[in-house]
Image (cartoon, rainbow, N blue to C red):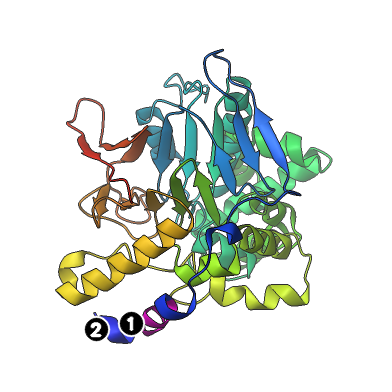
């Protein structure tokens, strides 16, 4: 690993040049607010600010964070069931009540059930809101890569799923809501029937692969139906005192404006290009210190010298204080030790590489209740619990 001075040179500069006041980061008077009424009379409603959601007030709610899923529907269901938000009866029912679920991105690539997972999460969100809960997703680097047309990490089954889903969408008369929400319930059988009904010679069949690439391009190009679905999700989300993003939020990201950045990326995914979006690429979606690619907070601190650890801690504290948050939750970098926290538990890392296309590890999730966070490792296993530190 290269020294910190080489890998993160711009970050030392950011501390000096991107200090911003808190009023740049909070909702302005013209922001769009959406309430979700609690089913329990003693709980206040969830208030969602902006579209895509950027700031969420969810008073007294249990929050669960799930890391990268990478196309593994089986592991996704396992993790959600472990988190207490998904039924174990195979009916994909929401069991979380008024829980707020946050998924940290990278649903795409390395697995064959990407659209099915997106469909499942949308269905759960619809169910959760009826009970006073909610499901949020933030986009990761693999979502932005695919919208850019970078298909390097697409599993062969992922291409097949795109072909099958596009045909299913045609059968449903291009009724996106109907086809997308129901895809998780019929995807397995539909794909099996689809594969049996055609002259299929395996993943090296170039004609079939070309069909898959074309189908994926149609779905995920800026303005495509699946890209527009991803555009519903933010790059950065703040729920109560917690900030959620895929890679990591830095002071100069905050200086650009969280809501502005979310809007820029959403407009790009919806195919609404303008001159302002040209500056967002290295802020949000490209470059080693962009929001979706940043690994500054996710690497093992034992790799750094003491002065480098202090530098990273200072950057993290400045970012959190500016957005008035206690802690940040990130995915992106698989943690072989499982869900863990660092820097006085002001950063939580929840990507455990659970997908069979990554580390094929056992699922783990992060649970946040009030001022306490703990890693839920599996049913019956001991879980770690640490007090989240408040900042002055």
The range drawn in magenta is: 9-14
190 inside magenta stretch: no
Instruction: Using the image as rendered, state which of residue 293 and residue 316 is in the foreground.
Output: 316
16 lies left or right of 228: left
274 lies left or right of 133: right
- Residue 90 visible at all: yes
- Which percent across, then down, holds residue 197? 65, 43
Q: Residue at horizontal 53%, vertical 58%?
A: 22
- Which percent across, then down, holds residue 392? 33, 51
* Disc 1 element: helix
Q: Residues within 10 Å of mark 1 (few under 14, many from 20)?
A: few
Q: Residue at horizontal 27%, vertical 80%?
A: 4
| Mark 2, residue position | 3
* Disc 2 element: loop
Q: Is residue 69 above or below residue 320?
A: above
- Which percent across, then down, holds residue 90? 48, 23
| Mark 1, residue position | 7
Residues at discs 1 and 2 in contact (Cβ within 8 Å): yes
- Which percent across, then down, holds residue 164? 65, 47
Task: Give the distance between the C-alpha atoms of the residues marked 1 and 2, in whole angstroms.
Answer: 6 Å
Which quarter of the image is occupied by the N terminus? bottom left
């Amino acid at each position: 690993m290269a020294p910190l001075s080489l890998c993160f040179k711009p970050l030392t500069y950011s501390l000096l040049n991107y200090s911003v006041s808190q009023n740049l980061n909070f909702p302005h008077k013209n922001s769009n607010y959406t309430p979700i009424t609690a089913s329990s009379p003693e709980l206040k409603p969830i208030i969602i600010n902006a579209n895509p959601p950027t700031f969420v007030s969810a008073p007294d709610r249990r929050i669960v964070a799930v890391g990268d899923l990478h196309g593994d529907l089986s592991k996704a269901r396992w993790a959600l069931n472990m988190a207490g938000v998904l039924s174990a009866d195979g009916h994909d029912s929401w069991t979380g009540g008024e829980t707020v679920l946050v998924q940290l991105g990278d649903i795409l690539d390395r697995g064959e059930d990407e659209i099915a997972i997106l469909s499942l999460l949308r269905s759960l969100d619809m169910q959760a809101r009826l009970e006073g809960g909610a499901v949020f997703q933030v986009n990761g680097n693999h979502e932005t890569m695919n919208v850019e047309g970078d298909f390097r990490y697409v599993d062969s089954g992922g291409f097949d799923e795109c072909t099958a889903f596009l045909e299913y969408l045609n059968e449903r008369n291009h009724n996106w809501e109907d086809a997308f929400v129901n895809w998780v319930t019929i995807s397995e059988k539909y794909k099996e029937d689809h594969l049996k009904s055609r002259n299929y010679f395996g993943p090296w069949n170039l004609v079939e692969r070309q069909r898959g690439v074309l189908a994926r391009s149609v779905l995920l190009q800026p303005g495509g139906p699946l890209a527009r679905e991803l555009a519903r999700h933010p790059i950065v989300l703040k729920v109560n005192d917690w900030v959620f993003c895929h890679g990591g939020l830095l002071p100069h990201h905050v200086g650009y404006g969280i809501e502005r950045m979310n809007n820029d990326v959403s407009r790009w995914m919806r195919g609404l290009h303008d001159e302002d979006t040209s500056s967002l690429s290295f802020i949000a979606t490209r470059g080693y210190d962009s929001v979706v690619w940043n690994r500054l907070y996710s690497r093992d601190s034992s790799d750094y010298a003491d002065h480098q650890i202090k530098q990273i801690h200072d950057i993290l504290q400045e970012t959190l204080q500016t957005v008035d948050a206690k802690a940040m939750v990130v995915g992106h970098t698989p943690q072989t030790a499982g869900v863990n926290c660092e820097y006085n538990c002001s950063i939580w890392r929840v990507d455990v590489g659970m997908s069979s296309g990554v580390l094929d590890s056992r699922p783990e999730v992060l649970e946040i209740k009030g001022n306490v966070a703990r890693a839920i490792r599996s049913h019956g296993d001991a879980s770690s619990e640490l007090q989240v530190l408040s900042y002055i």
